[in-house]
Amino acid sequence: MAHVLNPWLALEAGADPAERTRALLRAHEAFLTGAPVSAPVRQVVADSWRRCAGALVRPENVARLALTGADLAAHRDAHPLARVMPVVRELLGSVADDGAHLLSVCDERGRLLWVEGHPQVCRKAERMNFVPGARWAESAVGTNAPGTALAVDHAVQIFTAEHYCRPVQAWTCSAAPVHDPVTGRLLGAVDITGGDHLAAPQSLALVQATVRAAESALAGPAAGRPGAAAPALRALGRDEAVLDPDDGRPPVRLGRRHSEILLLLTAHPDGLSGDRLGRELYGDRDVTPVTLRAEMSRLRQLLGPLLASRPYRLRRPLRTDYDTVREALAADPAGALAAYRGPLLPLSEAPGVVRLRRMLEDRLRQRLLGAADPVLLEEWVGTPWGEHDLEAWEALLGAVPAGDPVRPRLATRVRELRDAFGLPDAYPP
């Protein structure tokens, strides 16, 4: 029976790394000249290449420094992953010390916080700016293990010419995302980088085991964070929300209607009458009160005493990722963007949910446009929900200094979008 390759691993057993690299280089060059992605490119890599092309990532891109000096030190010290670096070093330290590999940890925006290993390997990695403070998000430097792991929220290996940008194609890396065990918020990624011998199941398994240990440490007694005592709801970028109980039970995936109800109740802590909740859920549709009561009865079986009636309300606060973004907007647009995992229950047509979804996205967009930070704007337009945002692309073009080599490609993208929207070309070549 044929061996089925784990899609997140780079090479199947018995594959010739040199021959695979040559085939990938041919496929990569063909893709850059307009051909469709062809074998032997894995689906996860093909999807990443298409995202990179859509974000106008140049194949010769090198990572830029996003944090330096005191700013880098302060951000690193304050980051939640600083607490678990002893665990990461304990499990991956031998990898970083063997003279052939690097251990790195990045934040949720792909900014490298720690890069550790033999000095000779570190110096070699400096040539591609794989250094603390550099931003390795996929939208900035193309397909790479930490950046792609953040983009798809899954552990992944990236092998040699699977990297989108040529300066990185001599390397192979394995990375896995790290989440806050209470809120589910993406915190960053752990990565090991080295030669093509890293394209083995053991390297990815080691990184994943390290991440599990780090998340367990974050959930331990020292995890006295605000909101750690409350259950949490994850609804951003998900068609069905996930409830993280606070009593040791595993996460609960909710159906779409229960996701909508629970989200609406968190947004109305004083409760909602049956009539009001029905309007928020069904709008003008002719739905009988019996239908709503049946939904609430089924939801009560999941939530138990957390759900009260007359009016419908939650007996205890329920922390949501929606709250995290909303609260960060005023003072920390970067934090708000990092916590924003996509539109709120994007397929929901419930009027109350649609209103919350539009309100959050509009406030986030206006905050990013007002900040005029090219790093944040570049990250926004590199997402599926921001890639066609003409106003954001124009703001990014305006935020990049004259003479910057990225301006021509930004202007090209703006012209493409203006043409797609039937607008006159305001940015001639």
Image: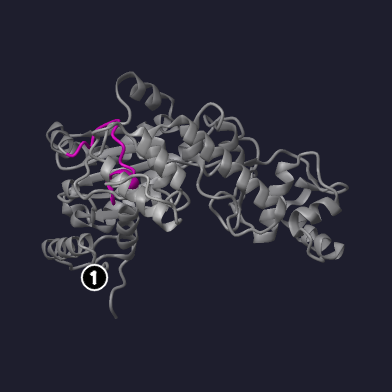
**Visible residue check, residue 109:** no
- The reply, left or right, for residue 248 in relation to residue 297 is left
Q: Residue at x 65, y 60 (%)?
A: 256
Query: Residue 116: where, in percent of width, then height?
Result: 24, 33
Query: Outermost residue, front direction?
Result: 424
- The reply, left or right, for residue 268 in relation to residue 181 is right
Identity, as a three-letter code, of the amino acid under mark 1: Ala
Magenta span main SS: loop
Q: Nearer the viewer, residue 68 or 286?
A: 286
The magenta span reads 128-143
Q: Residue at x 52, y 29 (%)?
A: 222
Q: Is residue 69 above or below residue 355?
A: above
Query: Residue 81: where, in percent of width, then height?
Result: 41, 33
The verdict on residue 180 being magenta is: no
Query: Residue 55: where, in percent of width, then height?
Result: 34, 50
- The reply, left or right, for residue 89 in relation to residue 387 is left
**Visible residue check, residue 238:** yes
Residue assigned mark 1:
39
Element under disc 1: loop
* Label 1 packing within 10 angstroms: few (<14), some (14-19), many (20+): few
